[in-house]
Image (tube, helix red, strand yellow):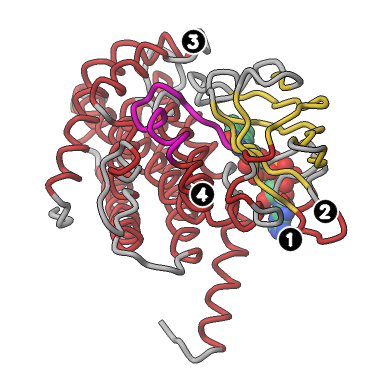
Amino acid sequence: MDYFLSEVNLEVRQLAREIAENEIRPVRAKYDEEEKFPWDIVAKLREAGLFGVYIPAEFGGMTEGVDKGITNLVLATEEMSKVCGGISLCLAATALGTLPILVGATVEQKKKYLPKIASGEHLSAFGLTEPDAGSDAGAMKTTAVKKGAKYVLNGTKQFITNAGEAQIYTVMAVTDKSRGSRGVSCFIVEKDTPGFTFGPHEKKMGIRASATRQLIFDNCEVPAENIVGGKEGFGFIHALETLNYSRPGVASQALGIAQGAINEIIPYAHERKQFGQSITSFQAIQHMLANMQSQVEAVRALVYSTSKWIDSGAKKFSKESAMCKLLASEAAMSVTTDAVQIAGGYGYTREYPFEKFMRDAKITQLYEGTSQIQRNEIAAGIIRDVVAGKNA
Ligand SMILES: Cc1cc2nc3c(=O)[nH]c(=O)nc-3n(C[C@H](O)[C@H](O)[C@H](O)COP(=O)(O)OP(=O)(O)OC[C@H]3O[C@@H](n4cnc5c(N)ncnc54)[C@H](O)[C@@H]3O)c2cc1C
């Protein structure tokens, strides 16, 4: 189907597709098995210029004018996730970590940090979640106390993607407890800052080529000029805005995983013979395939149109962004489970990629807000709109 993608969008998709097929496919099982970070793929993405697809040209990236580059990011993530939903995160999670700078930083901060992220020299990571503050991120306990020209950070961030590998961390911390979520600020913390260390690698079900660790701050002194936007109290707003922009990206990871599973199950099913015929000749299998691709195509239409709308300068899209993530992640889980079903017992073994697609799909229903949290966001949005007379 033609989604009226721009020439730049198509070029980004093609570059990502080539890297996925030529570079990621041969190593995806190894990285999954060894749970190592894919630095050789990072090098290929750097060479192709893909780390800058959502960053403005004036800061070394690719976008011009109001374009936020979300469609570029979505296409690159989808293509890589068709082959490996874990490896695609070296780019997608860097975008997540960079978005607070894009949405809230001063021009000086953007000039300082974005060019090296756009070139891929620096990866980044986003630190919101804490051991006791997941869905309820506003319950965070990490503090940042002003001391002269520095802020002193103390606390722990939980489950941070790219932790230990990234150079740049955007970290939310409480600067004024009495103001609730208005008392949260966002800080740019560089990897080698004294007092900043990482917890052990989490041993995960899926996306095992992606690093997930704690960020530990123990009297970590950060220069006061690293507070995003130069002012206290905007960290929670920056975090929520970041998630609005990034959720179509998670949706595209889910979309890619689902499409990848379909792309690989059809040739398998066509080859596999039972009762003297290919299992694709059974209507039960055909109907599963039809449902799988129909779900994926419906989700793709929503994700692409939302991304294009954001790139055209839309201002309020939290509901649509949440819908993308909710539906894409639910589709990914359903499609990959069906792919394992179609592959039968072989689908359950690591000799075939189907169980990995299913393991990788699950995280998309959990991070950047669980499916329940997306539904809360969507419900709040539709009730607000309809009560205000803005029926769909
Ligand atoms: C592999 C991985 C990578 C991650 N990467 C990052 C990252 O880079 N940066 C970052 O900041 N965080 C990251 N996270 C954290 C992730 O966003 C959280 O795990 C997620 O938001 C859920 O929080 P929780 O795990 O504490 O679950 P909880 O909040 O404890 O939720 C448990 C259950 O309760 C439900 N629930 C909670 N509140 C409600 C409610 N109000 N209504 C209905 N149901 C509710 C949830 O839906 C869920 O089913 C990552 C997590 C993982 C596992």
Q: Which mark is residue 33?
A: 3
Q: Using the rendered image of the protein, determine whether residue 134 is visible from the camera's viewpoint.
A: yes
Q: CA distance from mark 4 to mark 3?
A: 42 Å
Please rate how many residues cluster around mark 3, counting C-alpha atoms within 10 Å: few if below 14, some from 14 to 19, many from 20: few
Find out if the beta carbon at label 1 lies less than 8 Å from the nearest ligand 1 atom.
Answer: no
At label 4, the amino acid type is: Thr
x then y, percent, for residue 169:
59, 32
Please rate how many residues cluster around mark 4, counting C-alpha atoms within 10 Å: few if below 14, some from 14 to 19, many from 20: some
Circles 1 and 2: CB distance less than 8 Å? yes
x then y, percent, for residue 69:
31, 48
Circle 1 residue: 182
Q: CA distance from mark 1 to mark 4?
A: 19 Å
* 138 versus 273 height, above or below: below
Find out if the beta carbon at label 4 lies less than 8 Å from the nearest ligand 1 atom.
Answer: no
Q: CA distance from mark 1 to mark 3?
A: 43 Å
What is the secondary structure assignment of the residue under circle 4?
A: loop
User: Which of marks 2 and 1 precedes in the sequence?
Assistant: 2
Circle 2 residue: 176
Residue sitting at 18 percent across and 56 percent down?
3
The magenta segment is 111-126
* 50 versus 173 height, above or below: above
Circle 4 residue: 106
* 223 versus 376 height, above or below: above
Please rate how many residues cluster around mark 2, counting C-alpha atoms within 10 Å: few if below 14, some from 14 to 19, many from 20: some
Q: Is residue 119 magenta?
A: yes
Which corner quadrant of the image does residue 278 belong to? Answer: top left
Q: Using the rendered image of the protein, determine whether residue 272 is visible from the camera's viewpoint.
A: no
Q: Quadrant of ligand 1?
A: top right
Q: Is residue 310 magenta?
A: no
At label 2, the amino acid type is: Asp
Q: CA distance from mark 4 to mark 2?
A: 21 Å
User: Which of marks 2 and 4 precedes in the sequence?
Assistant: 4
